[in-house]
Amino acid sequence: MAKETLLFQVKTSREWILETFDKVSVEDMTKIPEGFKNNIHWQLGHVAGMMELPTAALTDSKSDDGKRFQKYFGYGTSPDDFDDETPSIEEIKALLEGQVPRLEDITEESLDEDLPREFMGMTKRYEQMSFMILHEALHAGKIQEMSKLIK
């Protein structure tokens, strides 16, 4: 039951995020709207990078995407930190599109596993995943707000 609910929620929030690629040009994704500290490129990378952490843990992925994305899109970073190694919009889109199918193969048992260390008071993988979905939905709203201001 928890798996079905979490997958429904992550699919819904991910649809909101992926709509951005059809509605906002790559050029506009690099603009920082007045009153914001970052741009849509950063927002998308942040969502992808944060969701990659629990996704990789739940799917036993050996990818370095999580670490690479944290370098450029983690808490406290900004587009000022971007360089030639920053994941591109296309790389971010590919990671975002690939995460949900990877999560479809997780088990109920894996969701009930203990986290290696406490995360914001949470101790179970399903708690962390629930928080990441909430986090993603909040950023989906920010992205929508930013895209309206850019146009």
Image (cartoon, grey):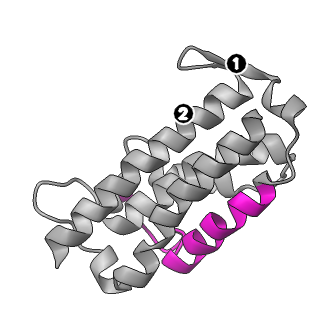
Q: Check disc 2: other Cα within 10 Å, few if <14, some if 14-19, many if 20+.
A: some
Seen from the viewer's position, the closer of residues 148 and 43 is 148
145 magenta-colored: no
Location of the C terminus by quadrant is bottom left
Q: Which residues are magenta?
A: 81-102
Q: Residues within 10 Å of mark 1 (few under 14, many from 20)?
A: few
Instruction: Name the mark nearer the viewer: 2 or 1.
Output: 2
- Residue 5 is drawn in which quadrant? top right
- The x and y percentages for residue 122 are 61, 18
> Which residue position holds label 2?
131
Estimate the spatial distance between the alpha carbons at disc 2 and disc 1, rounded to whole Å.
15 Å
Q: Is residue 146 visible?
A: yes
In the rendered image, which residue does mark 1 sit on?
Answer: 117
Q: Nearer the viewer, residue 33 or 71?
A: 33
Mark 2 vs 1: CB contact within 8 A = no
Residue at point 48% right, 39% down? 134
